[in-house]
Amino acid sequence: MQRFNWFPKTLFGRTLLFIALIVVSGAVALAGIARYYAGVASQRAYDQLLAGATIQVAEDLYVQGGVLALNLPVAALSTLSRYDLVYYKVVDSRGVVVAGYPDLPDPTSRLAARNGPQFADATYQGQPIRLGFLARYLPEEHTPGWAIVTVAQTTHARQQLTNEMSFKVWTLILLMSILAIGASGLAIRRGLRPLARIETIIAARDPADLRPVAAETPSEIAAIIGAINGLIGRLAERMTAMQRFIADAAHQMRTPLARLDAQIELLDDEHDPARLATGLDALRTTCADVGRVTGQLLNHAMVTHRTQAVALQPVDLVPLAKEALGRTIPLADDRDVTVAFATDAPHAYISGDPIGLQEALSNVLHNALLHGKADDIVVSIVTTDTAVTLTVTDNGPGIAPEHWEAALRPFERLGQENAAPRTGSGLGLAIVQEVVKAHGGNIRFALPAAGGFAVTLAFPSLPSR
C-alpha cells in the first residue's frame, strides 16, 4: 500500500496539521453559518421596509364614486428603489387591477393577507423579486370587499447586504483561524522543548554511561523518561551480567587450557610408553573437559538469548522428555543404566520454547549420569489443572541440602565435600534454572525416603488440546 508523501514526518508537523485541519473545518462551518444568518438578517431588514411600503400603499387607497382609486405614496416606494426596481399592483374586490402592473404575480393566499403583510419569492421580467401582500376591506365600493395590494422589489440590495455582512464575518473568521493555527504552532514548539532537551542529553552520552536520565519535564514527558530509565536500567543489568559472564567464562576456560598446554609440553619430552599412554589419557580427559565447558558456555549464551527473543508456543512435554531421555542415555558409556518413564496423561501441554526445554532436561539428565554416577533413572510427569511437573529421580548421591542454593548459581563448583566429586563448569543447573524461570516455573530438589536424588521442574499448564 502506497503511503501519502505529503503527510509530515515530524511530531510538530503532524500535530500542527491535525490542529489546522480542525481549525479549517470549523472555519468553513462557521463561514457557512455566517452566510446563512447574514441572508436571514438582510431578508428581515428589507422585509420590514417592504412591509412598510405595502402598508403605506394600502392606507392611501380611497373610494370615489364607488370605484377604488390610489393616491400613490412616492416617498414610501422611493425608499425601496434606491438599489432595486419596485413594482406594485392594486386589485379591487372584483378582481380588477385598478393600478400598477397587471402581470405582477398574485398572492398565494388572499385570506392570509387579511391578517397583515405576507411575503413570497417569485420571478418577474426575468429577475428574482420579493413580494409583499396586504388586504384591506373597503365597504364603500359598489361591491364591498377586500382589495389586495401587492408591492414587489428586486433582490439586488438584499444580496449586496448579505455579501457585505458575510465578508466582514469571513474576514474575522480568517484572522481568528490564522491566529489559532499560529498560536498552536508556538505552543507545540514550546511543548516539544523538553523532548529536544532529552534528545540532547541522550545524544551527548557515552555508550558506557548507563545512569538514569535526570531532567525537569512535564508529567506527560516524565512517563517517557521513566520508560527510558527503565530500559537503561535493564540494559545496565544485562551488560553487567554479560561482563560477569565473560569474566567467569574466561576464568573457566583459562584453567583447562593451561592444563592442556602443560600436558602437551610433558608429552613432548616423554619417551616411556606407559607414561606416554597415561599422559594421552589425561590429555583426552582435558580435551573432553574443554569441549564440555565450551559447549555449556555456548548453551548458556543460547538459552539467555532465547529467553529474551523467542516467543513461547504450546509444547507437549511427554514426547519432548522421551526425546531428551533418548539423546542423553548414550552418555553413560559402558555403564548399565536402567531408565523408566511414567506419565499420568498422554499429553502435558505448557507454553514454552522447545529448544530451551530440551536443553534444560538434557542438563538435568547429564548431571545425574555423569556427576551423580547414577545407574537407575526415572522420569515422571504429573499434570493438574494448573501445573505440569516433570521429575527426574536417580539413585546417585545427589547434592547435600546446604548446597542446593549454590548449585543453581553459574560457575559454582561443588567440591569433594559432597558425596560425589564434581568437576564440571557449574553451568548445568544454572541453565536449567534460567530456562524454568523464563517459562514462569520453578525448580526444586529433594532427597526421597527410598534414597537417591530428585530434581523437579514445575511449569504452568495449558488446557488439553
Image (cartoon, grey):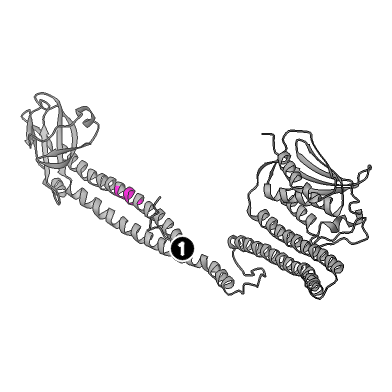
Magenta span has 187? Answer: no
Badge 1: few (under 14), some or many (20 or more) residues near its Cα, within 10 Å? some
Nearest the eye: 217 or 362: 362
Residue 427 rendering spot, x and y as whole percentages: 78, 59
Regarding residue 423, the answer to whether it shows in the image is: yes
Q: Determine whether, in the image, residue 293 is placed left or right of residue 146.
A: right
**Residue 353 visible at all:** no
Which stretch did the figure color magenta? 30-35
Residue 296 appears left or right of 204: right
Q: Farthest residue in the left direction?
A: 65
Image height of 275 relative to 72, above or below? below
Which is more toward the observer, 336 or 244?
336
Badge 1 amino acid: Phe
Give whichever of 14, 109 is nearer the camera: 14
| Residue 461 versus residue 303 in the image, above or below | above
Q: Name the residue under label 1.
A: 12
Most distant residue in the top direction: 143
- Seen at 84% across and 57% down, the residue is 407
- Magenta span contains residue 31: yes
Give the secondary structure at mark 1: helix
Residue 110 in the image: state x and y as whole percent: 19, 28
**Magenta portion: prevailing SS class:** helix
Q: x, y percentage for residue 233?
A: 68, 64
Give the vertical position of 368 relative to 387 (above or below): below
Residue 250, percent from left and from top: 74, 69
Q: In this view, does 330 lie to the left or right of 306?
A: right
Q: How many labels does the image show?
A: 1
Residue in front for this viewpoint, 397 or 15: 397
Q: Is residue 175 left or right of residue 310?
A: left
Q: Classify residue 317 by image quadrant.
A: top right
Say which quadrant the C terminus sits in: top right
